[in-house]
Every structure is written in structure tokens, then in C-alpha cells.
Image: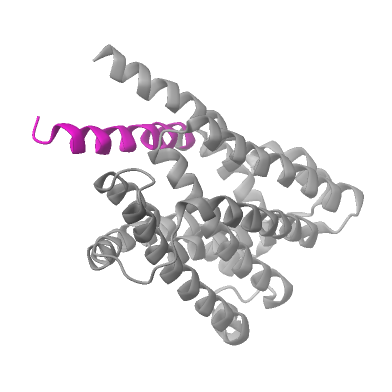
Amino acid sequence: MKQHVKEISKHGVIYTISNFLTKATGLILIPIYTRYLTTSDYGIVSNVLAIVNFLSVLYIFGMNAVWGRFFFDFKDKSIEQKRFFGSTFYLLFFGGLFLNVLLSYTGKGLFKAIIPELDFSPFVLLAVWTAFFGVVFNLKLTLFRVRQQSLQFGLISFGRFLLTVIATIYAVAILRYGAYGKVFAQFAVWGLFFFIVLYLLKKDLAFSLTSPKLKQALKYALGVLPHSLSGSIMNIIDRVILTNIKGLAATGIYTVGFQFGSIMQLIVFSFNLSWSPFFMRTAQEKGAE
């Protein structure tokens, strides 16, 4: 029992640190934002992040949960496992790309109806593509997590965090591009890591559009998706409503306070990242016991 607690705690500490750094980027950069962004600028940034968070959940379609669940049904790095990952990945990738292009060309009216004060170009367009780039990154993090490679998880997360901070400071504090600088910096960093992670994923995937477990995986994803989407909507709906009622400036001020209030959530989420793969691995090995 002590060994299990030690194992979960070891990975949990690394996940807590890496998640704090990556998810608390906004908190760490508050001194920059409050000095170089207006409250309306920060309201724009907040709404863009809300769109990114929602679309990220939609694009990934519960497949991170699928990979975490079915990983243990195969021998690790076997050809069967690679075909399973390949079939689910390419289905997700091309489906997400199609939806992304569709939103880019036809989504202006939809987003204007939801957040009238937010300009579709460039802000919504950058949000749409940032969300798409992030899907590949999150799938690779899932593999690091289920293999309990918490150090690799932490290193790549920290690398993205560091580049995001540097790019944001350069765009906002030096170039003085305001809200556009912050949004574009995130888009550029996610785009860079999109290609890096695609390269890293090559060894985990075998090109395949079929897998014996594909139908089972899609049923599992459809069960997870409503839960994921409802959680995402709960996390963003406050900013959308506030923007429509009180404007971007009020949303900017509200979001600063929200950043401080989310610290406890990071700690709980990080523990779960360590607990889930441990539980699934143990359940696969010991069954009813």
C-alpha cells in the first residue's frame, strides 16, 4: 500500500508543478497584463481563451479519455496498439481539420451572435486554429501520462509554458501589440508544438483506418463527450454572459480574480492525472481483486 501511495505521490508532484506552470500562465503574467493591456484587451483575451478551451474539448472528442482507457488492452508499443492509436488519431485529425476549415469560412455569423463584441478576424480565427493545434499536443500528453512518464510530461509542458511566456512578453511588452499580441503569441507557440508533437507521435502510430476496437472506442468517446462539454461550458459561460451584459472591460477585471481562484482546482486535477493510469493499470492486472 505504501508503495502505491509513494508511486501516485511521485507522479502527482510532477503533474502538479507542470500543470501549475502551464495552466497558470495567465496568473504568472498578470503583472505584464495589468501594465500593458487595458481591461478591454484582457476581456478580449479572456473570451478568446474561452473559445479555445471549448473547441479543444469538441475537437478532441473524448479521445484522450479513450486512449487512457484502451491503452491497457494492448501490449505497449505493439502493432495492434499502434493501429488502434492510428485509426483513432486519423479519424480525429481529419474530422477536426474539416470542422476547423468550416468554422473559419462560415462561422462569423455564429460567433457574432454569441459574443458580438469580439471581432471574428483576427481573434476568433486565431482561437479556432489554436484549439486545433492543441489537440495533437494533448494526445501526446495522454500517452506520457498512461505510460507514467511524468518527467517527459513535465518537460514538454514546461517547454511550451516557457515559450508562451517569452512570446507573450515580447509581443505585449516590447512590440506593444495589446490583445492581438497575446492571442497571436499563443497561436504561434501552439503551432510550433503541433509540428514537434506530430514528429514525436510517429513512433506511436501505424497508419490505419480500421481497428477491432474502433467501434468500441467511439461508443466510449460519445459517452465521455457530454460530460467534457458540459464541464467546459460551465468554465466559460460566465465570461460570455458577462461580456454580453457588461462588456469586455468588466470581463477583463473578473478574469483576473478568477485566475487566483483556480489554484486549488489545479492541485486536484493534477492528483487525478496520476491516479487514473495507476487505477487502470492495476485493474487490468488484478481484475476483480
Towards the viewer: 177 or 213: 213
Counting from the top left corner in percent of width and height, residue 158 is at 64, 37
Q: Which residue sits at x=8%, y=35%?
A: 288
Instruction: Tell me: 153 left or right of 251.
Output: left
Counting from the top left corner in percent of width and height, residue 24 is at 60, 39
Q: Which residue sits at x=31%, y=55%?
A: 80
Instruction: Tell me: 130 left or right of 165.
Output: left
Does the magenta segment cover residue 75?
A: no
Which quarter of the figure has residue 154?
top right
Towards the viewer: 161 or 79: 79
Which quarter of the figure has residue 232?
bottom left
Q: Which residue sits at x=58%, y=86%?
A: 109
Counting from the top left corner in percent of width and height, residue 63 is at 38, 59
Does the magenta segment cover residue 286?
A: yes
Q: How many numbered callouts?
A: 0
Indicate the quadrant containing the C terminus: top left, top right, bottom left or bottom right.
top left
First to last magenta residue range: 266-289
